[in-house]
Image (cartoon, rainbow, N blue to C red):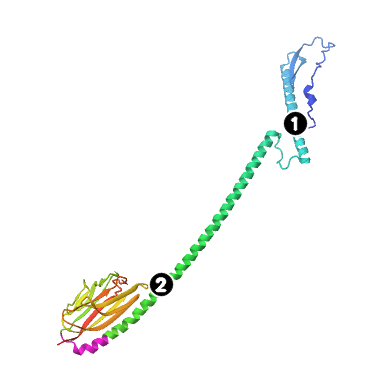
């Protein structure tokens, strides 16, 4: 298709007034002809063609039809080129600030400019909202980092406290383990000293606890009896009743939580305090006392005391034995 043709507005007023030259009668007077009606760009015309040649008539109509299509296509292309030229002129004159290249076959008009303005306004609104969201996100991020830092500090403090408590418990257990041989040795020495004076009617008791005890202002009961020769100790009441009059040795050892206090005393006949002990986490006491037959002794626990015992670790002990019977 040729592209050198350019549409002009005067072409719309073009009218074809000429007709096909009249048939020459010279030498063809005997030939029969007929008229063919054709149309191009809305203008009708007539052509004389040999009569009876239908194929020729069809070809002529097809020719003019294709010619009409070609001219119309050239006119549309010319309009597009004009729109592009006008757009380029506007760019040169700085009338269009920033605009994408024109889409083929689309001419920018006032309606398109309004759409462009609305789109630009919506884009600016979206940018503003994105900026606000980014600011909120930064604030949340800063707050989260601060909270995480505080939690980490608290965890480190808890870890340090846990380590200190563990060390205190270990030290207490070590001290108790070191004290046990000394108590055993002292007990052995005491027994060896008084052994010659012990009468055949011996009295020995040793009671322990196998579970924790939360202090109450009362006498301490026991859960297990290691020895009760003479039958003087009652586990339920925690009191020992002297079966005979004589000189008795009494000893007490307790263990509590590392930071809990323990306050206890050995009382005679519910009121008279023979010996007392107190401490943080542990305490022990012993005494030698003259008891009459049917006198009672027991361990009285203050309400603030908390004792720690298990079936495998029986720290609480209340023991005693008859050193010498009074004759």
Is 76 left, or right, of 227 in this rendering? right
Between discs 2 and 1, the one toward the N terminus: 1
Q: Does the magenta stretch include residue 217?
A: no
Q: Quadrant of residue 220?
A: bottom left
Image point 59% across, 47% down: which residue?
A: 129
Magenta span main SS: helix
Q: Which residue is drawn at 34% across and 79% down?
A: 177
Q: Position of residue 53 (x, y in %)?
A: 73, 16
Q: Distance between the residues labelled 2 and 1?
A: 93 Å
Q: Quadrant of the N terminus?
A: top right
Number of residues whose C-alpha sits closer than 10 Å to that of mark 1, classed few (under 14), some (14–19) or many (20 or more): some
Q: Which label sits on residue 165?
A: 2
Secondary structure state at the residue bearing disc 1 = helix
Which image quadrant is residue 313 in?
bottom left
Could you say where residue 31 lies in the image, as x and y percent from the top left? 79, 11
Residue at the (79%, 24%) spot, across then down: 11
**Residue 79, disc:** 1
Do labels 2 and 1 touch, CB within 8 Å? no
> Which residue is drawn at the image coordinates 27% and 79% (left, top)?
252
| Disc 2 secondary structure class | helix
Toward the right, the furthest residue is 26
| The C terminus lies in quadrant | bottom left
Q: What stretch is highlighted in magenta?
A: 188-200
Q: Is residue 35 visible?
A: yes
Depth check, mark 2 against mark 1: the one in front is 2
Front-most of 19 and 181?
Answer: 181
What is the number of the mark on residue 222?
none
* 193 and 300: which is toward the camera: 300
- In the image, residue 92 sits, relative to residue 44, either above or below, namely below
In the image, taking residue 199 as reference, residue 308 lies left or right, namely right
> Could you say which quadrant of the image residue 318 lies in?
bottom left
Q: Position of residue 171 (x, y in %)?
A: 39, 77
């Amino acid at each position: 298709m040729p592209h050198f043709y350019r549409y002009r507005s005067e072409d719309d007023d073009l009218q074809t007034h000429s007709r096909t030259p009249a048939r020459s009668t010279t030498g063809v007077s005997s030939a029969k002809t007929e008229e063919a009606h054709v149309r191009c760009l809305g203008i009708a015309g007539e052509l004389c063609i040999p009569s009876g040649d239908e194929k020729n008539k069809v070809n002529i109509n097809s020719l003019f039809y294709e010619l009409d299509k070609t001219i119309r296509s050239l006119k549309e292309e010319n309009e597009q080129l004009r729109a592009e030229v006008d757009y380029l002129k506007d760019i040169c004159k700085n009338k269009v600030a920033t605009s994408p290249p024109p889409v083929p076959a689309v001419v920018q008009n006032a309606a398109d400019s309004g759409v462009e303005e609305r789109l630009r306004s919506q884009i600016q609104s979206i940018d503003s909202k994105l900026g606000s969201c980014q600011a909120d996100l930064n604030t949340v991020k800063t707050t989260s980092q601060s909270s995480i830092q505080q939690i980490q500090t608290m965890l480190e403090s808890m870890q340090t406290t846990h380590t200190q408590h563990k060390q205190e418990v270990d030290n207490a257990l070590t001290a108790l383990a070191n004290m046990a041989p000394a108590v055993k040795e002292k007990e052995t020495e005491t027994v060896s000293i008084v052994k010659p004076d012990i009468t055949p009617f011996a009295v020995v008791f040793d009671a322990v606890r196998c579970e924790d005890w939360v202090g109450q202002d009362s006498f301490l009961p026991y859960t297990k009896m290691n020895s009760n020769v003479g039958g003087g100790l009652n586990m339920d009441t925690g009191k020992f009743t002297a079966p005979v009059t004589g000189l008795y040795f009494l000893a007490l050892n307790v263990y509590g939580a590392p930071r809990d206090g323990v306050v206890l005393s050995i009382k005679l006949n519910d009121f008279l305090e023979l010996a007392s002990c107190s401490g943080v986490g542990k305490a022990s006491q012993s005494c030698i006392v003259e008891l009459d037959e049917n006198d009672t002794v027991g361990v009285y626990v203050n309400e603030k005391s908390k004792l720690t015992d298990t079936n495998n670790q029986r720290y609480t002990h209340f023991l005693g034995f008859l050193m010498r019977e009074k004759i």
